Amino acid sequence: MTKRTYWLEHAWLGTTTEPGVAVTVSAGGPAAGEDGRITAVRTGVPTPPPGAEILRGLTLPGLANAHSHAFHRALRGAVQVGSGTFWTWREVMYSVADRLTPETYHALARAVYAEMALAGITCVGEFHYVHHAPGGTPYADPNAMGEALIEAAAEAGIRITLLDTCYLSSGFGEPPTPHQLRFSDGSAEAWAERCTVLKGRDHARIGAAIHSVRAVPADQLATVAHWAEERRAPLHVHLSEQTAENDACLAAHGRTPTRLLSDHGVLGPRTTGVHNTHLTDEDIALLGDSGTGTCMCPTTERDLADGIGPAVALQRAGSPLCLGSDSHAVIDLLEEARAMELNERLRTRSRGHWTAAALLRAASADGHAALGWQNAGTLEPGALADFTTIALDSVRTAGPVPRLGAETAVFAATAADVRHTVVGGHQIVRDGAHARVPDVPSALADAIDVLRG
C-alpha cells in the first residue's frame, strides 16, 4: 500500500466548499488489490504540499450511477427520432441484446464504463439481465456475461455493483418471448442458484434485481427478496415506469405493483425502486414507510416519454433519492441531478425543490448507499478515496465564485467539464483523458459497430 496526497484547489465537503484542501489517501483500487481510502483531510492549505498531486478546479466526491444497462449505449442516436412509445423502443433494444456475446459485451461495457469515468462516475450499478446465449442456452460458465461486466469495470478503473436480475416472463402469466429467453433462468430458484456462484471483489459487489412485477411471477418474488436479505445485498426493481404495467398488474392481482411488492416482502431499506413514476398516494406511503429508495433516471424518462415521477413526495415520505443514467441517452450525473429539479419545476411551475447540495448527495453518497457502498461518496477520513474534479474555467463554469461549489456543479457544469477522476486513490482520468482506455471514442465506436452489424 502506498500513500499519496492530493491538493484540491477547491473541494465540496458536503455542506461547504473550501479552498485549499489536502487529502491524503492510501492508494488501493482494483489494480492494487486494495480498496484505497482517505486517511486525512486538511482544510486551509493555501499552497500544494511538496510532492502532492494538484487537482485544479472543484473536487466533488465520486459520483454513483445507480442504474445502468450498459448495452443500451449502442442505441444512442439511433432511437431518438420518430414516433412511438417505450414499447416500440423496446423492440429495437432487443435487437441489440440479441447480438451480445461475453466478448462483445465486455468490449462495449469497458468503453461505456470508461465514458462514465470521464464523466466523474466512480461506481456503477449494472442492472444485468442478459445472462445466457440466444435461445436461453447457458454458456459453459453460466455467469460469463456477468463476469464480463465485472472485468470491464476493473479495466475501466471504476467500481461496480452487479445487480444480477431475475427475469422469467414477458407479462403476467405469459412465458418469455424468443428475445427474452436468454434473460430467463426458468425459475427464481434456478436464478438464485446461478447467482450464488458470483463472488464480489475489491472493486465489485454482487446485488440482486427483480426486473419488474410483470417479469417475475408473484409467487417467486419472495425467493429473490430472501436471497438478497440473506446476503444483506442491495435489491433493485423497475417499478411503475409505465401505466400499462400498472393496469396489467391491477387486472392480474387486483393491486398496484408497489402493493404487490410490499405483500411479498420485497420493500425495505436495502431495496431501491427504479423510476417509481406512476404511483398512487398509497404507493408513495408504502415506499416511504418501508425506507425503500427511489432511483430517478430523468434523461431516460424524458427520452422514452415515461413521465415525471413524484420525487419530492417520495423523499418527503421517507424514500431516499439517487440517480442513474439507465439507457445512456446521456451519461452525465450532473445533468441527471439538474434534470430532477428542472422536471419538478416544469410539473409544478414553481422553483427550488431541492438545494444543490441535496442534489449532489443524491448523485454521490446516496447513490453509493443504494449500491451497497455506504463508505463512499464523501470526502472524509475513512471513506473510499474516490473523487472527481470539474473545471471552473470552461465556457459553462467560468464566472460563478468558487464558494458556490454545489450550485456551479449542478446548475452550470456538465460531464464535459470533468478534468480528473480518482478511484481508490489512483488517478483514472487526468486532464480529461482516460489513463487505461486511451481512446474512449474509438473504443465505443468499434464496440457499437460490431453490435449494429
Image (cartoon, rainbow, N blue to C red):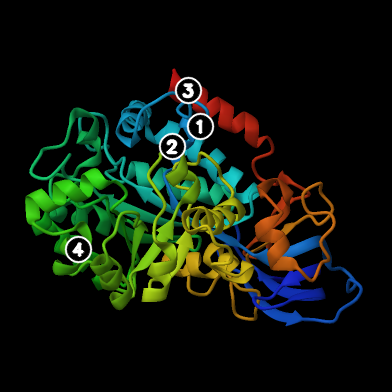
Q: CA distance from mark 2 to mark 1?
A: 7 Å
Q: CA distance from mark 2 to mark 4?
A: 27 Å
Q: Is residue 256 left or right of residue 108?
A: left
Determine contact: label 2, label 4, CB under 8 Å.
Answer: no
- The percent position of residue 9, horizontal first and vertical second, equals 83, 67
Q: Earlier in the sequence, mark 2 or mark 4?
A: 2
Q: Residue furthest top?
A: 453
Q: Is residue 165 above or below residue 7?
A: above
The residue to which callout 3 is attached is 450
- The percent position of residue 358, horizontal first and vertical second, equals 57, 70
Q: Quadrant of residue 27?
A: bottom right
Q: Residue at x 11, y 38 (%)?
A: 175
| Amino acid type at image mark 1 | Arg
The residue to which callout 4 is attached is 261
The residue to which callout 1 is attached is 76
Q: Is residue 84 left or right of residue 425?
A: left
| Amino acid type at image mark 4 | Leu
Instruction: Name the secondary structure under disc 2.
Output: helix
- The percent position of residue 213, horizontal first and vertical second, equals 20, 52
